[in-house]
Amino acid sequence: MRKRVALVIQRYGEEVNGGAELHSRWIAEHLIQAYEIEVLTTRALDYVTWANHYRHKDEMINGIRVRRFRVTRRRDPTRFGRIQEYIFQNPHTVKDELRWLKEEGPCSQALIRFIRKRKAFYDCFIFFSYRYYTTYYGLLQSPEKSLLVPTAEADPVVRLQIFKDFFHKPRGILYNSLEEKELIHHHTHNSAVPGEITGVGINLPEERDADRFRKKYSIDGPFLLYLGRIDENKGCPGLFDYFIRCYTEVPDAPQMVLIGKATIEIPKHRAIRHLGFVSERDKFDALEAAEFLLMPSKYESLSMVVLEAWALGKAVLVNGDCQVLKGQVLRSNGGFYYHNYPEFRETQSLLMTNSNLRNRIGRNGHEYYLKNYSWPVIVEKYHRMIGQVTGE
């Protein structure tokens, strides 16, 4: 009989197309060949308020049973912001941090009760994203059966007192990168907990067409590409500043295409084109057409869009203040990194003017992706960690 494995994630669905949520869905869909997989999640879709969105308790998504539980209380972004600012900037107690965790959400007491009452039914739980209510309280119901995929970033949350002991609880930890593993070890001293650097693979479409993308969106000439949520936490204001300055100073500078939902104002500039949310086919067509990918974020546990670029043999230019991105670039030789405007200008100019170098760097990234983040490699690591829990 196949082992029963439950994946626990704060929100889940084909409408959720990024971050740990997409990560968890792809893992679930690749593990279903070997295990009885279920997903335990909330009815929330919006990560800002965690408002209940999905009407049905259970549904099937790509052959996987998804159990949804009501969110007990919506998040008030203003109240949450005040509490977060307080604990990040002031001496505080564990009680303050637990209050922050409750505001962080999504609070679903029904989900936690279900795990506690039904833990004997499952052979293994895999919890995604350490910082959420569902992971923290859910994992504590059955730590001896639990694996953790932390998706931790180098922000103040990882230094909170409530997580120092928490990272010692699971049977194993599946890290996204070497830097994430070192970050967690540094702050929690949990090196005795078994772990694997796994990350996530990429589901590539069978064919990509650069000309199709250019024709559909009327884009001529070379362009740089940004993929993902367009907001302050992703480093977009700094990217806009650097790009506009560079465009005025560098002859024949390329345009920039942005794909993703915007939560901040995008500068009105003749060389900046925002396409909003696009289909998966259009996204990969855009990557195929782009000269290289821009990733300005300071906080990443693993950038899926960087892996997507490398899967297609594209070079990347990343923010060197993000240790994860910088480390990936150094190990792969698959791109450049920058710390300031002069470095941004010189590296983007070098990538644009030297196509042989750009293509060679893209090939390096592709080889690194195949060796470390292709699906057979990742699935085998999950098998080993699940086997550690189930005794196989």
Image (cartoon, grey):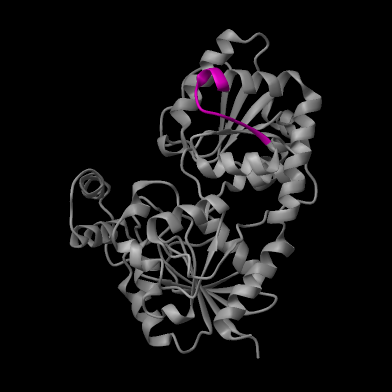
Q: Nearer the viewer, residue 183 or 218?
A: 183
Tally of marks: 0
- Left or right, residue 57 beside residue 216: left
- Residue 151 on image: x %, y %: 49, 56
- Does residue 131 appear in this view? no
Q: Quadrant of the C terminus?
A: bottom right
Residue at image location 70% in from the left, 55% down from the top: 372
Residue at image location 58% in from the left, 8% down from the top: 249
Residue at image location 42% in from the left, 39% down from the top: 233
- Left or right, residue 183 beside residue 353: left
Which quadrant of the figure has residue 309? top right
- Left or right, residue 143 beside residue 361: left
- Residue 67 on image: x %, y %: 47, 74
- Residue 123 on image: x %, y %: 53, 84
Which quadrant of the figure has residue 56? bottom left
- Residue 256 on image: x %, y %: 60, 24
Q: Nearer the viewer, residue 86 or 276?
A: 86
Q: Is residue 111 magenta?
A: no
Q: Is residue 339 magenta?
A: yes
Q: Which residues are magenta?
A: 335-343
Q: Quadrant of the N terminus?
A: bottom right
Is residue 386 depicted above or below 314 in this figure? below
- Does residue 27 appear in this view? yes
Q: Nearer the viewer, residue 325 or 255?
A: 325
